Amino acid sequence: MIKVYSNEDRFLVQQIKDMLESNGIPCFIKNEFAIGGAGDLSPFDCWPEVWIIDNDWQTKAEQVIEGVKSDPQQGRDWCCKKCGETNAGSFGICWSCGAQAPQHD
Ligand SMILES: [Zn+2]
């Protein structure tokens, strides 16, 4: 077994695990519920971790994780083609004129 990812944000960790599983990589989360009951451990020691069961998957797993982290569609501002207004990445339509966000593909 080998640890491939760790982050204080357990939702991000869960997302990584889901992505690995959807790519057919057997994995599990350690420390999922450890936060809040840290005791003597430093917070870093209690970050949730994604582990893969078979080390042979490590290269593939790292590629998947890179893909999740560098997803250009997440949180990137976009510029409205119709009115030129800048919109937050989470907006599906322009807040100013209501035009559709450009598709990233
Ligand atoms: Zn607009």
Image (cartoon, grey):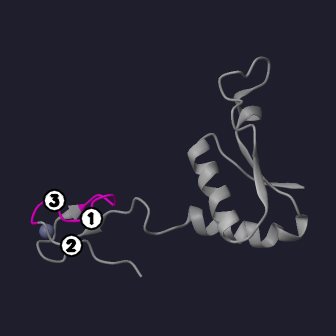
Q: Is residue 22 left or right of residue 76?
A: right
Residue beneath disc 2: 100
Q: How many marks?
A: 3
Residue 20 position in % (x across, y down): 69, 64
Residue beneath disc 3: 95
Is the residue indicated by label 3 positioned so its CB lies within 8 Å of ligand 1? yes
Q: Is residue 44 left or right of residue 14?
A: right
Give the numbered dot on residue 92.
Answer: 1
How far separated are the C-alphas under marks 2 and 1?
6 Å
The residue segment tinted magenta is 87-97
Q: Is residue 4 left or right of residue 12?
A: right
How far separated are the C-alphas under marks 1 and 3?
9 Å
Q: Residue at x 51, y 67 (%)?
A: 71
The quadrant holding residue 58 is bottom right
Q: Is residue 37 left or right of residue 99?
A: right
Examine the structure image and report whether residue 88 is included in the region drawn in magenta: yes
- Badge 3 marks a residue whose secondary structure is loop
Q: Report the front residue among 46 and 26.
A: 26
Residue 100 position in % (x across, y down): 21, 72
